[in-house]
Image: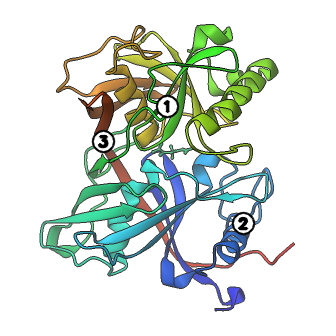
Amino acid sequence: MAATDGIRCMLMRGGTSKGAYFVADDVPADPDERADLMLRVMGSPDPTQIDGLGGAHPLTSKVAIVSASAEPDVDVDYLFLQVVVDRPVVSDAQTCGNLLAGVGPFAIERGLVEPRPDETPVRIRMLNTGDLATTVIRTPSGVVAYDGDTAIDGVPGVACAIELEVGGGSPLLPTGRVTDEVAGRTVTLVDNGMPVVLVRAADLGVSGDESPADLESRGDLVRAVEEIRRAAGPLMGLGDVAAQTVPKVFLLSAPREGGAIATRAFIPTRVHTSIGVLMAASVAAALRIPGTVGAELAVLPDAASATLVEHPTGTFPARVAVEERDGVWYGTSVSERTARKIFDGTVFPRPRL
Ligand code: NQM
């Protein structure tokens, strides 16, 4: 494949993020070649991403690579790549629950999954984490429906609902403890699909309802958050995370909008304008475990109800189930998102610099 020929690509909004979706056969299998190509597709490294598809923010600099799965009971494999905006880094160390919302529609559009007359279930293996996800896509007359009446905070308007059920087989608390002392702060390290570090906003000298721009502008805070993140990475089994986009650091405070908890998420240098799907699942799961950072700040609904996680542009309803087996906590999550096909065509990657 000569890159100058262009590559088949679909740009989709998945939840509150946006990314380029590819069929695995259309891009190089070699991770280094693929990373080089994705930097040139997105226009990285460059703070404006002026010469590529990227939108100059981590939430709009994402890639999903989808292929038919060889696993029994799985329809497609989904590999997520985070293309760093201003550095020549492409990371597969995390998945993305927002882009996950577009994987089912994309797989049906590309003929990887046969549509059914009304609704089409799609079982997805998330290659980055090994977790399995189940979605059901509305396909009236065998065609993916994007229009609908579901609103999600952080996205204007309404679209067709997509339910995402994600189940992990790994323990929720990577250290086995409900709290740890990390870089001089009491934190909870939790992973219900996305590794996150929970710290009280007050412990870092902020109230926790500041705007993302305000938080990003506070140099001391940004440095303290990064120090916590780098110290937490090895404890969470992630190794040296200096060049990685995980774990994400959450500042927690008491809810203000009638939800369960207020959040601000460093992802990890920019502050999320809302919240990631699996991040919300991780926070909501932690709140259900006695003794965690956040549990004492939270106003929890009953176990069957969605946990409303407040974020800078609204709330995210995360339905989580947690269970303790032999002293180890496990969790699953169900979230509702929407997705939309924005364009389908051929992308022409920038030449090498
Ligand atoms: O946690 C952003 C997003 C995400 C991740 C990030 C996500 C999730 O909001 O499930 O969706 O990882 O920085 O797209």
Say if residue 22 shows up in the picture. yes
Label 3 amino acid? Answer: Ser
The image shows residue 195 at horizontal and vertical percentages of 51, 39
How far separated are the C-alphas under marks 2 and 1? 34 Å
Q: Nearer the viewer, residue 209 or 72?
A: 72
Which colour style is shown? rainbow
Q: Which residue matches tag 3?
A: 335
How far separated are the C-alphas under marks 2 and 3? 30 Å
* SS of the residue under disc 2: helix
Q: Nearer the viewer, residue 275 or 78?
A: 78
The image shows residue 41 at horizontal and vertical percentages of 68, 70
Q: Earlier in the sequence, mark 2 or mark 1?
A: 2
Q: Residue furthest right?
A: 353
Contact between labelled residues 3 and 2, with CB atoms less than 8 Å apart:
no
Label 2 amino acid? Answer: Leu
Q: Which residue matches tag 1?
A: 175
Q: Vertical placement of 99 versus 293: above or below?
A: below
| Mark 1 residue crowding within 10 angstroms, few (<14) / some (14–19) / many (20+) | some
Quarter in which the C terminus is drawn: bottom right
Label 1 amino acid? Answer: Thr
Q: Residue at x 59, y 82 (%)?
A: 7
The image shows residue 104 at horizontal and vertical percentages of 32, 64
Q: Which residue matches tag 2?
A: 39
